[in-house]
Image (tube, rainbow, N blue to C red):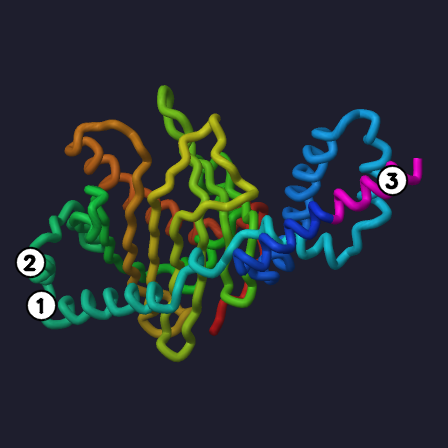
Amino acid sequence: MWRQRYNGIKLFAEYVKGQVRALTEQNVLIEGWRSSNFRIRQSFRCRTEHYFKSKPASDSLTWQYSWKNFVSRKQLTLGLAACAFKWQGNDVSDDEIQEQVDELRNIQEIIRKQREDFSSHMPDHWEEVVAEEQIKMWKYPKDDDSGLMEYKVYGTFSDIPARLFFNIQLDNEYRKHWDDLVLKLNVIDENRAKNEQVVQWVSRLPYPFSHREYIFVRRAVINEKEKLMIISSKAVEHPSCPVNSNYVRVSCYTSHMVIRPHKSFDELGFDYMMTYCDDPQIVLPASLSSWVVSQGIPEYIKKVHDACLLFGSPAGRSGRSNFPNYSV
C-alpha cells in the first residue's frame, strides 16, 4: 500500500513540475493568478480531476491521497498560474487611448473652424449616415483587410453631467435594468493596476438569430488634467469563457468612447466621440446591415442618456451599484 502511495506521489510530483516548467517557458505573469484566484483554482481542479480519472480505478485512493497531502501551496500556485489569463498583449494600451483622444481633438478642431458646415470637411472616405443637431455619425472602411466598416459618432448633451454619462456605461448591474438587449453582463477578470476588466456580454437578437456573445477587455480612464474620460474596449479570448454553442461568439469588436465636459465633470454639458466596429456574423445585404448599425448606435446612446435621467428616480436607484474611482 505504501509503495503504491509513493509511486502515486512521485508521478503527481512530475505532473506539477511539468506545469511549472510550462509556466517558466511561456513567461506567464503571476499577477494573472493573483487577480483571478478563485477562477483559476476551479479551472485547475477540473484538469486535475480529469487527470485522476485517467488512472486505473485501483489507484484512485492513492492519487487522491497524493493530491490532498503532498502538494505544497507554492507548487499549486505556480501550477494554477499556468492557466491564467495573460494581460500583457491583451490589455488596452496607452497608445490606443491616446489615439482616440487625438481623434476627438481633430474633430473638434474642424468643428471650431468650420462651424455649421463641418461635416463636409471630414476625411473624404467618411460617409455621413446620421446628421442630426445633437448627433453626427459617419462610416468608413476599417484600416485592415477585414472588409468591415467602422463607425464614428460625435455628439453633445447639455442636460446631464459627463461623470454620470461615463459611470452609467460602466455599471453592469444597472445596465441590466435599462438595456433590454442584455442577456448576460458579468466581469470575469480584472486588472486593478490599470482599471481594466474582462467582461462577458451576451446580447439578445430576435428570432431566428442566435444570441451574440462578446468577451472583451475594457479599460476606463479619467484624466483630471486634460479633463477627459475614456472607455475603451476590444475583443479578447479568455480561458474561463470557452466558446459556447448556445451563442455566436463575436471575435471582432472594438468600442472607444471619449468624453470632454463643457466645464467640469460634474456640471451639466459635455461632448463625446464614439468609435465602433464589430462583426456580428449576420448575413444581411450591405445596405440593410448599414441601416441596422446606423439605427442601433444612436439608439444605444439614447438609452444611456435616458438611463442617466432615470438615475435619480426610485427605479434608477434600485438597479444601480456603487461607482468605482477611475481617476488617474
Asked whether, in this view, residue 48 is left or right of residue 243, the answer is right
Task: Give the labeled residue for mark 1.
Answer: 114
Task: State how far apart marks 2 and 1 are (Cα).
Answer: 9 Å
Amino acid type at mark 3? Arg
Q: Which residues are magenta?
A: 1-13
Question: Residue 305's mark?
Answer: none
Question: Residue 5's mark?
Answer: 3
Helix, strand, or loop for circle 1?
helix
State the residue in front, 19 or 106.
Answer: 19
- Whether pointer 1 and pointer 3 mark residues with C-beta atoms closer than 8 Å, the reply is no
Amino acid type at mark 1? Gln
Rendered view: 148 above or below 288: below
Asked whether, in this view, residue 291 is left or right of residue 115, the answer is right
Q: Residues within 10 Å of mark 3 (few under 14, many from 20)?
A: some
Residue drawn 68% across the image and 33% down it? 50
- Whether pointer 2 and pointer 1 mark residues with C-beta atoms closer than 8 Å, the reply is yes
Q: Position of residue 225 (x, y in %)?
A: 39, 79
Task: State how far apart marks 1 and 3 are (Cα).
Answer: 81 Å
Residue drawn 59% across the image and 56% down it? 23
Question: Residue 120's mark?
Answer: 2
